[in-house]
Amino acid sequence: MVRTVRALRRKPRLRTELSDADEQRLQEAVALFGLPKAEVVRRLIRASVQAGPALSADNTRAVVELASQVRMVGRNLAQVLRAIHRGQAVRIEDTEPVWRGLHEVVAAINDELTEMTVAYGSKLRREAKLALPAEISGEELT
């Protein structure tokens, strides 16, 4: 009985198609970390399990609260639009505090979400032993 090369291979293989953008990101990771593509992918797979879910329980609660704030902003904007359509809109100068407040809320939401995702990205890279030099030196300080 003749065994084929496939029958002798014991390691599972992965073949996947990437979008152009994902291929570019993978190429950037290869260049940044000085590792072959396969090793970058292997490390990220291992780290994704070791690092745990992308959001902690606290972060999940924060996202729920942020979603509530986004809905509140949406309701405020809808009320303004309804007033405009009814011809009840006030002068733009009088609405400046409302727009400024809405902008501040949206900026705060954006900052909090960015902080959560950046922190998780750093954690994932550390778990994959792909930490950037700035992340490593920052950890040494803490």
Image (cartoon, rainbow, N blue to C red):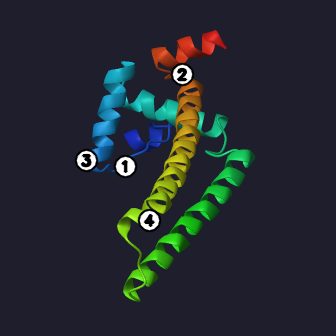
Residue type at numbered disc 2: Lys
Q: Nearer the viewer, mark 2 or mark 4?
A: 4
Residue type at numbered disc 3: Asp
Whether residue 132 is situated above or below residue 109 in the rendered picture: above
Residue 57, percent from left and from top = 74, 48
Q: Which residue is mark 3?
A: 20
The answer to whether the residue labelled 4 contacts the one labelled 1, judged by CB atoms less than 8 Å apart, is no
Q: CA distance from mark 2 to mark 1?
A: 23 Å
Q: Which residue is mark 1?
A: 16
Label 3: few (<14), some (14–19) or many (≥20) C-alpha neighbours in 10 Å: few
Q: Secondary structure at mark 1?
A: loop
Label 4: few (<14), some (14–19) or many (≥20) C-alpha neighbours in 10 Å: few
What is the number of the mark on residue 129?
2
Residue 78, percent from left and from top = 48, 77
Q: Which residue is mark 4?
A: 95
Residue 2, percent from left and from top = 40, 42
Q: Nearer the viewer, mark 4 or mark 1?
A: 4
Q: CA distance from mark 2 to mark 3?
A: 25 Å
Q: Secondary structure at mark 4?
A: helix
Q: CA distance from mark 1 to mark 3?
A: 13 Å
Which is more toward the observer, 115 or 53?
115
Q: CA distance from mark 2 to mark 4?
A: 51 Å
Residue in the image at 62% along x and 10% along y: 140
Mark before the other along the chain sequence, 4 or 3:
3
Residue in the image at 29% along x and 46% along y: 21
